[in-house]
């Protein structure tokens, strides 16, 4: 979790470089199964969509991105906005109004005004064509003017199209790297990133492929790739995280009793060394969380252990940790909860009944009790704060 946050923050720093006009390629070094979801999470963090493009051809990659852009935005409307702003800035006494005008009226209006000097020629040419041909293309379709601009000069056309979009609204790109030894996708990514430095472009590359690509003499592409590398490490197993948590507790000077209790939980959750009954395992988990909740200021005194709740069914439900006042139910799920289908279905019915009775249900996996304790406590802080604010609002 902490590693993910650090990587997302690193991607934010790369985004700031792009905003300054510095071409920056995000090279996520690691397995595809880890790098691709990380890029998706970063995009979601900023409310952006991810467009996956081919790494075989830069023009086709640009067209794929352009189609995705056209599917989510009205490019003719964007073009009219750019034309209005740029022409008004150049001729404040003659601010153009395109809305409600026919194609002929828009043409007369544009021909009466000199092109804005603030826009590159290719950008104004595309903008002008989109304003004039507003009715020629249906919603969501890619205007032919964009294809023509790309065919004439891919880099200039891509910059022109990107210029229409408000800052922070363009889809981000993930380019497939392709096969060794050429890794054409990296060259395609360079072409997109260099053409539009503000465009967020990423590639996911294995460590082996990256090492092979960077071997030999330095090139501009290799420098761009090397500068953008972010290592995406393999996720540690839950057992490894538990071991690390125990080591951290020792370094922090935790008491022998607390460390022994945490080790008992880890032993039950992560190994089969002790064949305990289900009741003994539950007791181990519950005692550990009970003591941690009692130590934590926000949760101390809030929850009652193994409390029953009557939700109107044939019999009351027993909840591991319950707060009647705040309508919060906390359940610990261990191996037994997932090894039996009937148990799994019963837990889902229990959740539904509790939710109908107005409870928020927070389920904690037993394997997370030791390695993710801080996250668990933080989540409970959030739930408790939200419930208390809700109650305060009702009283006022």
Image (spheres, rainbow, N blue to C red):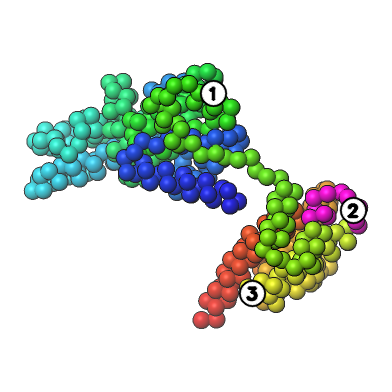
Q: Secondary structure at mark 1?
A: helix
Q: Position of residue 120 (x, y in %)?
A: 20, 33
- Please indicate whether residue 296 sits to the left or right of residue 261 in the image: left
40 relative to 313, above or below: above
Please tell me the numbered disc located at residue 274. Answer: 2
- Please indicate whether residue 223 sits to the left or right of residue 235 in the image: left
Mark sitting earlier along the chain (3/2) = 2
Identified at 76% across, 63% down, the residue is 259
Mark sitting earlier along the chain (3/1) = 1
Q: Farthest residue toward the bottom? A: 396
- Please indicate whether residue 116 sits to the left or right of residue 331 in the image: left
Q: What's drawn in magenta, residue-wise?
A: 265-277
Please give the residue where the numbered disc 3 appears in the rendered image.
297
State which quadrant residue 118 falls in.
Answer: top left
- How far is the residue under mark 2 from the one under mark 1? 47 Å
- How far is the residue under mark 3 from the one under mark 2? 33 Å
State which mark lies toward you, 3 or 1.
1
Please give the residue where the numbered disc 1 appears in the rendered image.
212
Can residue 266 be found in the magenta stretch?
yes
Residue 32 or residue 214, whichever sits in front: 214
Identified at 71% across, 61% down, the residue is 250
State which mark lies toward you, 2 or 1.
1
- How far is the residue under mark 3 from the one under mark 1? 53 Å
Local crowd at mark 2 within 10 Å, few (<14), some, or many (≥20)? few
Q: Farthest residue toward the top? A: 181
């Amino acid at each position: 979790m902490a590693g993910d946050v650090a990587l997302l923050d690193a991607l934010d720093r790369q985004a700031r470089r792009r905003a300054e006009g510095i071409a920056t390629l995000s090279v996520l070094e690691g397995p595809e199964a880890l790098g691709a979801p990380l890029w998706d999470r970063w995009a979601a963090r900023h409310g952006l969509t991810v467009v996956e493009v081919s790494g075989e051809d830069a023009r086709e990659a640009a067209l794929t991105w352009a189609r995705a852009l056209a599917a989510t935005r009205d490019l003719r409307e964007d073009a009219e906005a750019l034309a209005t702003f740029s022409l008004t800035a150049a001729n404040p006494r003659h601010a153009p109004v395109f809305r409600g005008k026919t194609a002929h009226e828009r043409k007369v209006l544009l021909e009466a005004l000199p092109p804005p000097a603030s826009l590159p020629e290719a950008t104004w040419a595309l903008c002008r064509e989109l304003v004039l041909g507003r009715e020629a293309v249906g919603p969501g379709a890619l205007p032919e003017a964009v294809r023509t601009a790309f065919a004439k000069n891919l880099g200039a056309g891509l910059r022109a199209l990107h210029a229409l979009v408000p800052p922070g609204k363009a889809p981000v790109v993930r380019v497939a790297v392709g096969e060794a030894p050429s890794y054409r996708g990296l060259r395609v990514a360079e072409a997109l990133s260099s053409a539009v430095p503000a465009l967020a472009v990423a590639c996911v590359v294995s460590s082996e492929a990256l090492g092979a690509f960077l071997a030999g003499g330095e090139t501009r592409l290799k420098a761009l790739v090397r500068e953008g590398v972010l290592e995406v490490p393999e996720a540690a197993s839950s057992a490894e995280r538990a071991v690390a948590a125990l080591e951290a507790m020792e370094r922090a000077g935790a008491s022998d009793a607390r460390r022994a209790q945490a080790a008992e939980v880890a032993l039950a959750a992560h190994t089969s060394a002790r064949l305990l009954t289900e009741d003994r395992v539950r007791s181990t988990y519950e005692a550990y969380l009970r003591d941690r909740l009692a130590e934590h200021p926000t949760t101390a005194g809030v929850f009652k252990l193994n409390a029953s709740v009557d939700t109107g069914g044939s019999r009351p439900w027993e909840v591991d940790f319950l707060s009647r006042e705040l309508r919060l139910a906390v359940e610990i799920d261990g191996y037994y909860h997932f090894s039996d289908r009937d148990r799994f279905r019963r837990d889902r019915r229990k959740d539904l009944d509790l939710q109908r009775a107005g409870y928020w249900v927070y389920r904690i996996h037993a394997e997370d009790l030791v390695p993710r304790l801080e996250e668990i406590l933080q989540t409970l802080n959030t739930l408790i704060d939200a419930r208390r604010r809700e109650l305060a609002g009702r009283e006022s």
